[in-house]
Amino acid sequence: MIIYSSYKSGQQTIYQKHVVRDDGSEAYRRSARFPFVHVVRDGFEYIVPYNDDMVPIKEAFDYLNYDMAERPVTSRTQAATAIRILYCYLDLANVDIHNIDADTLRGLIRFIRGVGTVQEQFKMETVRSANTVNTYLATYRTFFACRGIECDALFLRNVTQATMSTDKEG
């Protein structure tokens, strides 16, 4: 069984993936936090997203600070939050952003929402509404389009609609 969980450490949410054997013992645990920081330089507030090794994520940096440069910092921060969750999930699932298929996207949607299946369970501090999930998916579509990241599954509405329609709480 796979269990995704989250907890707060200061202001930062840390996500974990636990793989549990049939006997209940833990076979594997992985964490992801992918922080971002705000830096003001030359009168502009940059948002710098990092991976867990504190290496800036260029695609996300360019999107948040160049493609979205004319947007208010609050809008860019909301986009950074959505993108951070995307990168956390992809890290936990061990999937590169350029290799997202329909199954990965469905898993991402469940991860964002915090609602699991028989094989996956979620113990998240936040359970998000369907509206929030849709807002995040719209952010990902714009991010991917602006940065030239191909992901057919993200742009096929039937994948996202089918996953959301199985959610009874949203």
Image (cartoon, grey):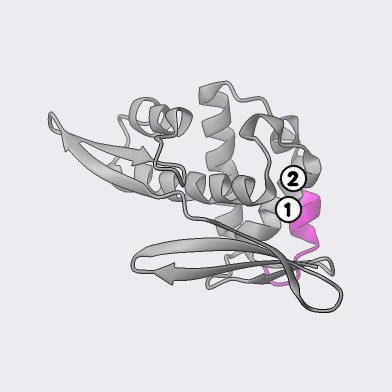
Compared with 164, 87 (above or below) is above
Residue at horizontal 53 percent and vertical 32 percent from the top: 142
Q: Residues within 10 Å of mark 1 (few under 14, many from 20)?
A: some
Q: CA distance from mark 2 to mark 1?
A: 5 Å
Give the position of the N terminus as an image quadrant: bottom right
Residue 87 position, x and y percent, is: 55, 44
The front one of 168 and 99 is 99
Mark 2, residue position = 104
Would you say the magenta stretch is mainly helix, strand or loop?
helix
Q: Position of residue 155 (x, y in %)?
A: 70, 33
Q: Mark 2 touching mark 1, by CB under 8 A?
A: yes
- Residue of label 1: 107
Magenta residues? 158-170
Residue 120 in view of the camera = yes
Q: Residue at x 52, y 41 (%)?
A: 139
Residue 4: quarter of image:
bottom right
Q: Position of residue 21 (x, y in %)?
A: 82, 70
